[in-house]
Image: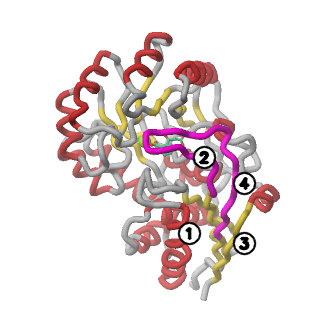
Amino acid sequence: MSFPIDEINIYTVRLELKEPFRVSFGTVENRNQILIEVKGQGISGWGESAVLPFPFYNAETTTTALHILEDYAIPLFFKTKPSTPEAAHDLLNKIVGNHIAKAGLEMAYWDWHAKRVGLPLYRFLGGTKTSVPVGVSLPIYDDAQKLLERASHFLGEGYQKIKIKIGPGNDRELVKLLKSRIPSIPLMIDANSAYTLDDINLFRELDEYDLMMIEQPLREGDLFDHAELQRQIKNPLCLDESIVDVHDARDAAQLKSCKIINIKTARVGGHTEAKRIHDLAASRNIGVWCGGMLETGIGRAHNIAIATLPNFVYPNDISASDRYYERDIITAPVTVTREGTIRLTEKPGIGYDVDSVLLQKLTTRKKTFVAQ
Ligand code: OSB
Ligand code: MG
């Protein structure tokens, strides 16, 4: 059979964030989001390359992602014609790193195949849950009272977990405030690599508060140091930036660098690697959950789908569309129930439709690639 994909479109869109998102490495303001459409046989598969504008979370930026997609990933895809999403993933790994860029294309191809066989993507991926538990991730605010208000607000909406961003100068006081004012709060903290082992006393002090977990306290390459830190504290460590593929997950399990892994479809290059990390973690008794990159509804829908796999056992960083956007790029927004879950839909593919009128309105740049 000839290769079914005849066209790929890259859309750069401008969907305004409701509030700036400040973390230890910088502040994400409005950015250009990259959406990818893989077309063939009358079917469109959609994906998102959820890069940040600057290379402070990982090495990628919006500009590098467009460059990798346009000059390497898409030409390689059309030249090699991978027949399955897994084959596409392994092919794209010929390109070193650049996982977030590659993830958008890989996930669009997963959506295309799921629609082709008429299955919801979550079932096509092997997911077993029909709803997934979710929490909310809160940035660093100038005023700690604002953090308290926002945490109460989202707990009131039903969210099952509050994750707060911390960094030097914004750490123990925030935890203390939230735990004293809302004693039952299911709380975790995320440092985005802002500390070193020299800060061990801070982490020892935090043992007093029963945190759900501490995410990525040290630098991404520091698997040894994370293991050392984990030996000395009670709160479980969770790795985000450190785990970009299944080999990292295996090393972290072997070294005991963490007890939990945050799987982001973007950071690991899409669903194929997310599944591999999920399976490895399950075999090593490491529970996982799905993290986010402030995705639009497209990336959000993909994250919901992967989070239905059985070893996603903690509340995921997947919030409703209205957490970040006034009006999402999908026709019906992602919503969260009063119980703090997102229900899966049985529609084929990602389960949400792109709002083509809004897409056209918000697109600042579109590039079309056709099969040779
Ligand atoms: O470290 O998990 C992170 C957002 C941008 C960059 C890094 C991170 C985050 C989040 C947001 O925590 C999670 C979400 O999409 O809701
Ligand atoms: Mg993180």
**SS at mark 2 in the image:** loop
Q: Pick whichever of labels 1 and 4 is earlier in the sequence.
A: 1
List the residue tagged with mark 3. Answer: 42
Q: Residue at x 49, y 54 (%)?
A: 125
Quadrant of the picture in which ligand 2 is shown: top left
Eye-nearest disc, 3 or 2: 2
352 or 218, nearer to the observer: 218
Eye-nearest disc, 1 or 2: 2
Measured as percent of width and height from the top left, residue 61 is found at 50, 60
**SS at mark 1 in the image:** helix
User: Disc 1 versus disc 4: distance between alpha carbons?
Assistant: 23 Å
**For the residue carrying disc 2, how many other residues have a C-alpha within 10 Å: few (<14), some (14-19), or many (20+)?**
some
Q: Are marks 3 and 2 in contact (CB under 8 Å)?
A: no
List the residue tagged with mark 1. Answer: 66
**For the residue carrying disc 1, how many other residues have a C-alpha within 10 Å: few (<14), some (14-19), or many (20+)?**
many
Q: Pick whichever of labels 4 and 3 is earlier in the sequence.
A: 3
Looking at the rendered image, the quarter that the C terminus falls into is bottom right
**SS at mark 3 in the image:** loop
User: Disc 3 versus disc 2: distance between alpha carbons?
Assistant: 36 Å
List the residue tagged with mark 4. Answer: 353
Q: Pick whichever of labels 4 and 2 is earlier in the sequence.
A: 2
Q: Are marks 1 and 2 in contact (CB under 8 Å)?
A: no
Position of 350 compared to 134: left or right? right
Disc 2 marks which amino acid?
Answer: Glu
Could you tell me if residue 135 is visible in this image? no
Disc 3 marks which amino acid?
Answer: Gly
User: Disc 4 versus disc 2: distance between alpha carbons?
Assistant: 26 Å
292 drawn magenta: no
Could you tell me if residue 198 is visible in this image? yes
User: Disc 3 versus disc 1: distance between alpha carbons?
Assistant: 25 Å
* Scheme of image coloration: secondary structure
Q: Residue at x 17, y 32 (%)?
A: 231
